[in-house]
Amino acid sequence: MNRYQATPQQNGKYLTAVLPNIEVSPTDLYIFSREGDRLDSLAFTFYDDTSLWWIIANANNLGKGSMIVPPGLQIRIPRNIGNLSERLNQLQTNR
């Protein structure tokens, strides 16, 4: 899946994505980032899907212009992500 697949375009340019709110849950996992961590590689590690990088980015206010995660940050990994992709598609459709 292309990471921009759900992002609408206008005149050949991508519009700003509207992302669903990701509530804090007792099932969330917390890690400390290490040198070389990237949002897409963390998504692969925890979700087995690099295209879900936006979940980790949105939950931690990261990913604005870069996939690189600075080392030493405490990162929240949302675990209950069952309907987030569906909610994302709904938000993009209702724009």
Image: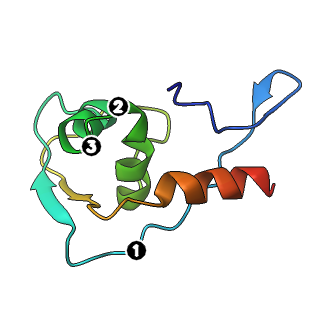
Count of numbered circles on the image? 3
| Other-residue count near label 3 (Cα within 10 Å), few / some / many at <14 / 14–19 / ≥20 | some
Quadrant assignment for the C terminus: bottom right
Q: Residue at x 42, y 32 (%)?
A: 66
Q: Nearer the viewer, mark 1 or mark 3?
A: 3
Residue 89, given in percent of the width and then of the height, sits at: 64, 50
Q: Earlier in the sequence, mark 2 or mark 1?
A: 1
Which SS class for mark 3?
Answer: helix
Residue closest to the far bottom: 26
- Above-or-below relation of 62 to 84: above
Task: Return the residue at label 3.
Answer: 47
Which of the 4 image quadrants contains residue 68? Answer: top left
Which SS class for mark 1?
Answer: loop
Left or right: 74 in relation to 87? left
**In the image shown, does 7 or 81 lie closer to the viewer?**
81
Which SS class for mark 2?
Answer: helix
| Other-residue count near label 1 (Cα within 10 Å), few / some / many at <14 / 14–19 / ≥20 | few
Label 2 vs label 1: CA separation? 21 Å
Report whether residue 88 is seen: yes
Task: Return the residue at label 2.
Answer: 50
Residue 23, label in figure: 1
Q: Identity of the amino acid at label 2?
A: Thr
| Other-residue count near label 2 (Cα within 10 Å), few / some / many at <14 / 14–19 / ≥20 | some
Label 2 vs label 3: CA separation? 8 Å
Q: Identity of the amino acid at label 3?
A: Tyr
Residue 54, given in percent of the width and then of the height, sits at: 44, 45
Left or right: 65 in relation to 9? left
- Above-or-below relation of 12 to 37: above
Residue 14, given in percent of the width and then of the height, sits at: 73, 31
